[in-house]
Amino acid sequence: MTTHEQIKRAVGSVLKNTSGLTQAELMIRLSKEFSKPITWTAAGPVVEQMIADGTLVKKDEGASRYTLKPRF
């Protein structure tokens, strides 16, 4: 199975019960599905809030890449 297929399957299983979840909560569920942090390169107010509350941590100094800090 390719990584792409694994991602599609994981996303599908996570998205089954997502009513009322925030974007951050979805990313946390995905990181649990893969049992490792997920790198996030998006920008915007959701990401800024996640950085402020410590959910996202800087991956590369000088780059706009962040890693989701797993909560498990």
Image: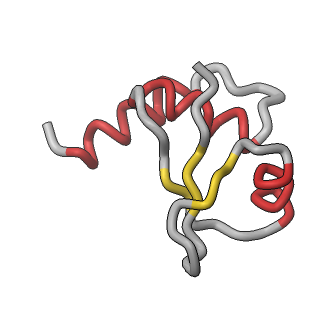
Q: Position of residue 10 (x, y in %)?
A: 41, 31
Q: Position of residue 12 (x, y in %)?
A: 47, 31
Determine which quarter of the picture holds residue 53.
Answer: top right
Residue that protrudes farthest toward the front in the picture = 61
Q: Quadrant of the N terminus?
A: top left
Q: Is residue 42 above or below residue 71?
A: below
Q: Quadrant of the C terminus?
A: top right
Task: Residue at 48%, 46% (x, y): give it.
Answer: 38
Task: Residue at 58%, 23% (x, y): give it.
Answer: 16
Q: Is residue 50 above or below residue 5?
A: below
Task: Residue at 58%, 80% (x, y): give it.
Answer: 62
Q: Position of residue 4 (x, y in %)?
A: 27, 48
Q: Is residue 39 left or right of residue 21?
A: left
Task: Residue at 61%, 39% (x, y): give it.
Answer: 69
Determine which quarter of the picture holds residue 36.
Answer: top left
Q: Position of residue 21 (x, y in %)?
A: 78, 31
59 vs 47, nearest the viewer: 59
Q: Is residue 7 above or below residue 12?
A: below
Residue that protrudes farthest toward the bottom in the picture = 62
